[in-house]
Every structure is written in structure tokens, then in C-alpha cells.
């Protein structure tokens, strides 16, 4: 119970830092002007990664240029370690703002990714399924942390949480939520 409370508190502080204009308060982007810097669409595939559940023209996979560049760099580095690409889902919509059913994904700074499967299939899995490959998922998260030690990865694998690689967040048994640590003036545009 104490571990669950600590995880909840960590997620709350992470969530509070995920605001549009200022750290420490959660702000809904619905009453804000669009951020013109949330304008870079992740290509459908590239070295080390593929996309999944992509909407037409990638309208659900738009981020800040720095976010998209981070994912692409991660793909290049991952391809050096594995011949199995990682899978990228939702980022944000152009200009940011609400993106139901997501609570986040409003600022062009986040991406959802599928955990790896033991059979290497480009299909969904979850932490309770026999197909889930913890070792490959761990290897990928370790690479994220090597490239960006300040990156946040939300994913509910209790072993990876115990190892300090990921954090618990409701609804994240079947996908990882990545937020690289970005230092950019792009974040404040349009707020």
C-alpha cells in the first residue's frame, strides 16, 4: 500500500510538471492558443522504429521538432542494439490541445509505445500476457535513460518500477508513455 501511495505521489508530481506554460500547475490547453511549434509529424517508419494505429497523414503523431528528433535518434541508437524496431503510437495533434482519451499528449512532448513481445510480432501485448518480453522492454528503457537520464517512462511492469526504470500510472499495462526531458523555447509558444 505504501509503495502504491509513493507511486501515486510521484505520478502526481510528474503530472503537475506537464503543463503548457508553467511548472507546478496542470493547465488544460482547451482555452489556450495553439502552439505553432507542435508541427512536426513523425514519419511512418525510420531506422529502429515503426508506427502503429496511425491516423491518416499521421495527424495523431505530431510533436515538437525536438520530440520527433528524439524519437528518431532513439531509433538510430536502438537499431544498433536490436533488429526488432520499437513501435510508436500517439504523440499529439498539430498545435497541441486536448487529445481524448488522453489526459496528456497536449504539448507535443510525449509518445506512447508498445512493449516488446517475445515473438517479435508488431502487435499489442501487456504486462500480464505470456507474449510480453520484459527483457527486451527493459533493454529499450535502459537505452532511453542512457540517452536522456531525465526522461520519464510510465509503464506498470512492477519489476521495471522496482528497478527504477519506469513509473506506475493508471492504464499503462499495455503501453509505455515516454516524455523526454526537453529544454526548448518551443514549449511556451502559444500559451
Image (cartoon, helix red, strand yellow):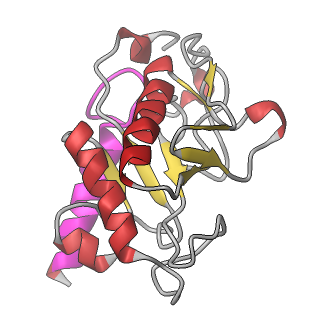
Viewer-proximal residue, 18 or 127? 127
Which residue: 32% across, 26% down?
Answer: 182
| Residue 178 colored in magenta in the image | no
| Depicted 96 relative to depicted 178: above or below | above
Q: Is residue 109 visible?
A: no
Which residue: 49% across, 66% down?
Answer: 115
Start-end of magenta stretch: 3-27
Which residue: 46% across, 36% down?
Answer: 71
| Depicted 105 relative to depicted 2: above or below | above
Residue 48: image location, x then y, percent: 51, 44
Residue 51: image location, x then y, percent: 65, 47
Residue 14: image location, x then y, percent: 29, 47
Q: Is residue 22 visible?
A: yes
| Residue 24 colored in magenta in the image | yes
Q: Residue furthest bottom?
A: 130
On screen, residue 1 versus residue 41, left or right, reads left
Which residue: 20% across, 85% down?
Answer: 1
Q: Residue furthest right?
A: 56
Viewer-proximal residue, 28 or 50? 50
| Depicted 117 relative to depicted 72: above or below | below
> Residue 176 appears in which quarter of the rendering?
bottom left
Residue 59: image location, x then y, percent: 74, 32
Q: Tally the marks.
A: 0
> Residue 154 appears in which quarter of the rendering?
bottom left
Amino acid at each position: 500500500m505504501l509503495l502504491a501511495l509513493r507511486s501515486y505521489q510521484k505520478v502526481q508530481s510528474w503530472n503537475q510538471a506537464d503543463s503548457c506554460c508553467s511548472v507546478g500547475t496542470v493547465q488544460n490547453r482547451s482555452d489556450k492558443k495553439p502552439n505553432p511549434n507542435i508541427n512536426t509529424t513523425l514519419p511512418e517508419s525510420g531506422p529502429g522504429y515503426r508506427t502503429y494505429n496511425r491516423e491518416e497523414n499521421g495527424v495523431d503523431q505530431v510533436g515538437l521538432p525536438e520530440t520527433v528528433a528524439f524519437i528518431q535518434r532513439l531509433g538510430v541508437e536502438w537499431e544498433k542494439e536490436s533488429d526488432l524496431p520499437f513501435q510508436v503510437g500517439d504523440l499529439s495533434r498539430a498545435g497541441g490541445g486536448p487529445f481524448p482519451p488522453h489526459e496528456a499528449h497536449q504539448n507535443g512532448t510525449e509518445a506512447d509505445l508498445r512493449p516488446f513481445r517475445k515473438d517479435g510480432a508488431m502487435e499489442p501485448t501487456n504486462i500480464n500476457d505470456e507474449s510480453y518480453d520484459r527483457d527486451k522492454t527493459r533493454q529499450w528503457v535502459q537505452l532511453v535513460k542512457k540517452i536522456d537520464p531525465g526522461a520519464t517512462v510510465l509503464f506498470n511492469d512492477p519489476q521495471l518500477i522496482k528497478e527504477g526504470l519506469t513509473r506506475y500510472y493508471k492504464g499503462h499495462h499495455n503501453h509505455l508513455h515516454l516524455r523526454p526531458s526537453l529544454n526548448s523555447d518551443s514549449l511556451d509558444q502559444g500559451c
